[in-house]
């Protein structure tokens, strides 16, 4: 499996340039991906200001209006790519072994896209007290990761369907019709299984998706608030103390 990576760094606040351990946050993500030895080519979709933080052999392309648009921009800069690893720029705690483990687990099940999830027990064992958003399923309580492995051939289909779901978010009735009442009830009553969620979202997105349980909580610890930035600096070193910019 040859994998190319697209780092999504298109937030308006420029969080990828926040200093963590005397380095821009995005530099940690780039390093983890390169050190995994599983990435063939890499593109960053983000503002021009990021260029100074990137190795010269990494292509920087403009971010899009949405995350989906940014992913498509990145994919366009990687011709003849078979698999894309989409990664957000705000997970500085990411480890090379987490990337390798995720990709290895993806090989075990045939699918069009893969999404990592981390159990609450795993997350709290390594980072007690760190606040994450969890979903309670029949299989356990999980938080989502900040990367997706997807076949390039499935990206456009998933992007179109995903944008449709986003457009419907302001119309709860239409969205609930599309998602299905039975699914919603099972989700709200914590009776939904991972397998059921996989099947449902595969139908919604028009491509087969698989959830991958990762033993590496760093894959899901994104810096989206001040306490997350403080955690990253405790683990990786402090560096200059720019304050966090809330989006």
Image (cartoon, rainbow, N blue to C red):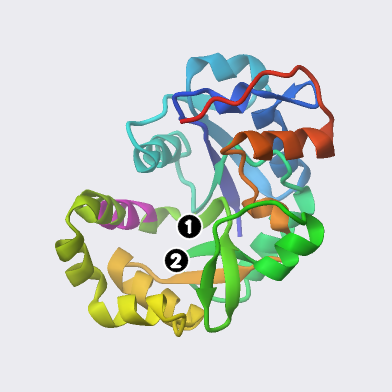
Q: Is residue 115 magenta?
A: no
Residue sitting farthest toward the front: 129
- State the residue position of label 1: 150
Report the magenta stretch's main SS: helix
Residue 234 location in percent, x, y?
Answer: 82, 36
Q: In the rendered view, tell whether residue 71 sits above or below residue 118.
A: above
Quadrant of the rendering where the N terminus is positioned:
bottom right
71 or 91: nearer the eye?
Answer: 91
Residue at x 49% of width, y 47% of height: 81
Q: Examine the rendered structure and indicate whether residue 222 appears above or below residue 192.
A: above
- Asked whether the residues under the numbered discs 1 and 2 touch, taking CB atoms below 8 Å apart as contact, a structural biologist would say yes
Local crowd at mark 2 within 10 Å, few (<14), some, or many (≥20)? many
Would you call the spot at circle 1 few (<14 residues within 10 Å), some (14-19), or many (20 or more)? many
Residue 184 in sight in this render: yes
- The range drawn in magenta is 155-161
> In the rendering, at what x and y percent does residue 246 appear?
51, 29
**Looking at this view, is 194 or 223 the one in front?**
223
Is 225 left or right of 185, judged from the image as shown?
Answer: right
Instruction: Give the total of numbered labels.
Output: 2
Q: State which quadrant residue 72 falls in.
A: top left
State which tag comes first along the sequence, 1 or 2.
2
69 vs 160, left or right, is right
Which residue corresponds to mark 2? 112
Q: Which mark is residue 25?
A: none
**Up-down: is 19 above or below 193?**
above
- Does residue 159 show up magenta in the picture? yes
Q: Position of residue 74 (x, y in %)?
A: 45, 36
- Give the left or right position of residue 180, taking residue 20 as reference: left
């Amino acid at each position: 499996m040859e994998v190319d990576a697209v780092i999504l760094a298109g937030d308006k606040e420029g969080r990828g340039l926040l200093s963590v351990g005397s380095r821009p946050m995005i530099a940690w993500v780039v390093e983890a991906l390169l050190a995994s030895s599983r990435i063939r080519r890499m593109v960053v979709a983000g503002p021009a200001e990021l260029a100074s933080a990137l190795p010269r052999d990494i292509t920087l392309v403009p971010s899009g209006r949405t995350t989906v648009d940014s992913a498509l921009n990145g994919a366009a800069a990687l011709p003849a790519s078979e698999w894309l690893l989409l990664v957000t720029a705000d997970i500085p705690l990411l480890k090379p072994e987490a990337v390798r483990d995720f990709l290895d687990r993806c090989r075990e099940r045939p699918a069009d896209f893969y999404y990592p999830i981390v159990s609450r027990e795993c997350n709290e064992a390594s980072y007690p007290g760190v606040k994450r958003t969890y979903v309670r399923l029949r299989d356990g309580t999980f938080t989502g990761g900040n990367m997706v492995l997807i076949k390039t051939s499935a990206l456009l289909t998933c992007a179109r369907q995903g944008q449709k779901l986003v457009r419907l978010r302001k119309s709860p009735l239409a969205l609930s019709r599309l998602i299905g009442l039975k699914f919603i009830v099972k989700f709200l009553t914590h009776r939904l299984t991972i397998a059921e969620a996989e099947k449902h979202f595969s139908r919604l997105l028009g491509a087969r998706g698989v959830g991958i349980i990762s033993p590496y909580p760093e894959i899901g610890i994104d810096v989206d608030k001040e306490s997350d930035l403080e955690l990253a600096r405790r683990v990786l070193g402090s560096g200059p103390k720019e304050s966090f910019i809330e989006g």
